[in-house]
Image (tube, rainbow, N blue to C red):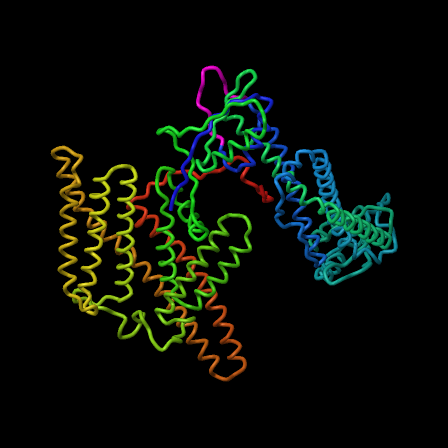
Amino acid sequence: MAVAEMSKINLAAMSYDKDDILNALQRTGAAEIKLHSQTQYANPAEVDCDGLRAYLSEIESALGHLCRATENYYKQAKTKTDLLDEPEISYSEFMFAKDKKEWADGVVGQINAVLDNGRRLETELAKVRRDLNAALIYSGYKYPLEVANTAHSKIKLGTIPARQKDNFIKDIAEVPLASYSFEGEDNDSALILIATHKSDAQKTDDVLQLTGFTACPFAVQKTGEELYISLKEERERLESELSENNAEWANLSKGVRDLKIYCDYVAFELEKAQASEKMMFTASTFLLEAYVPKAAEEIVKGTLESLDKPMYFEFSKPAEDETPPTLLKNNKVVKNFEAVTNMYSPPNVRDFDPNTVMAFFYSIFLGFIMADMGYGIMMILGGSFLYLKTRRENMIKSLGGVFAIGGIFTVIWGFLFNSFFGFAILPFKVMPDLQGTEMSWSLAGINVPALLIISMLIGVVQLCAGYVCKAVLCWREGHILDGIFDGMVWAVFSVGVELAIVGFVEQFNLPILKLVGGITAGASLLVAILTAGRKEKLLGKFTKGFGSAYGVINYASDILSYARLYGLMLAGAVIADIITSNSVSLISSGNVFSIILGVAIMVIGHVFNLAIGLLGAYIHDARLQYVEFYGRFYEGEGYLFTPLGSTHKYISVNN
């Protein structure tokens, strides 16, 4: 539960050694370049990153096309490939990528050429297929498709809808100087050749227009049969060329791994160029400032000294007005929950890391909401699968870890509630029923759902922990009295509230706790009111004390916020009970179809209920941490430590 202490390194070296020094710092994985403070004898660098950024974009675009084409090629071939997996490489192999520019540019050129050729072939093939479809009705026509008018007549070749054939025959009979013949027909269209004297040409056109006549789109000297055959040959040629072009992706796919490495190397070069914008330069030297974890000072020092380059550097403590990046030091379990806090705000480097405490409560709440041994086992298996399958540290991996850990608590709560996919499989129970005669407790004479009271009691425990964290934070900063009066006094108040609630529940049969809890809560609240304005003058002391008393109302509303734990758990439990009872009814009927249907409903229903339940639990659990818990003490407003060259998009580098 700690944030790594940060140091600052100031370095001056020759400009021509800048690249080697940045490479060395990248290898340590322990230096984040910061914006250098202004100095009298040096100036900021004018670095043009646009060209390198455009070059990286071009390579990434080509790599994206290659990966998609490779995936499609092997999917169509129904074979598996590991070419698209994220490669793990050594640091030396990563740095050797700088010598692959000529090769990479050639591969990118080939990718773009194959891509452009494929697009051209697909466009041409689509047109030929459209023409072939249109030429089908002309395939039996034995004469040239291009028709010519004579001095006194007009001749047209085309199609009319087959359903208009009778109407056409009826209407054209009223045109005395027109002659026609049907040359072919299919289900949709009829092929017609019509000749008419110029004097009746307009009447013929009117008839053709009414019947939906479409003129032959092929004005060629070939017969319909010859045209159809030539189009089929053209289609076969284009399909063959397209197949050969697609086969080129199989050859190019062999370069996916190296192109991924080169892409990330170019991204590193861009990162170094952007880092140069943060430095200061003289005519022949450069000045660099970077944040380094104090524990890594010796590693950075040894790496820089091993370069045997002329340079000067020193480590110092960051100034009070600086905000260094945050590097969290947590074990593998708590590390998964850092993502939850980071979505709210990473801790400030001068704060303490709340993730250990938050992870404990988050897991308890997640388990309480799901509260089923079967669901817990599924969460453990599914979360572990996500965690182990995902090599790169990211949100998916953390989410898998959170669900797996939450699954353990879900199994524990499920045991206490005696629930296994909605079945009561144990001969005993520990927690009250969600439904039935024991579902309610008497709280000061009012019947209240027992689990609602338990939810609020759990919430008071977390609020108490929040105030203790507030005290610890104040004491770390040297504010002893603030820690006592703004933290511990309210923690004691929370203990009193907890005891009082227990005392007012008749089922606990501990009435003495009403008195003990009331005195504890009242005395601590009085102390909080009297000390709230200790830093104010005159009227400020009164208003601060009044505000502290009024804060009890907010405190009560915060306790009620934990009712969402009961609501979410109740919704999931009722749905699980409905799924189980209906499935069992179908299965116990003895009918084969009913058994199959019952099993399907049970499997699909519980998977759906688990998915919906986890979504709600994840969101509302996080909300309780952000508002009710972190609202007591947490400031955040930090930013995560990102060492130079530590971010890779396509590969992982083993330094």
Q: Is residue 636 left or right of residue 236?
A: left
* Quarter residue 592 falls in: bottom right
Residue 478 pos. (x, y %): 27, 37
Type of secondary structure dominating the magenta stretch:
loop
**Total number of numbered discs in the rendering:** 0
Indicate whether 334 appears above or below 62: below
Q: Is residue 576 left or right of residue 505?
A: right
Residue 596 pos. (x, y %): 53, 77
Q: Nearer the viewer, residue 650 or 145?
A: 650
Indicate whether 128 appears above or below 534: below
* Quarter residue 453 falls in: bottom left
Q: Nearer the viewer, residue 606 or 168?
A: 606
Indicate whether 92 appears above or below 390: above
Membership of 43 in magenta stretch: yes
Residue displayed at 26% across by 66% down = 449
Residue displayed at 33% across by 62% down = 567
Membership of 191 in magenta stretch: no
Residue 4 pos. (x, y %): 41, 40
Q: Nearer the viewer, residue 359 or 300?
A: 300
Look at the image and tell me in which quarter the C terminus lies: top right
Residue displayed at 71% across by 39% down = 112
Q: Is residue 217 left or right of residue 87?
A: right
Residue displayed at 35% across by 69% down = 417
Q: Which residues are magenta?
A: 33-46
Q: Is residue 522 left or right of residue 69?
A: left
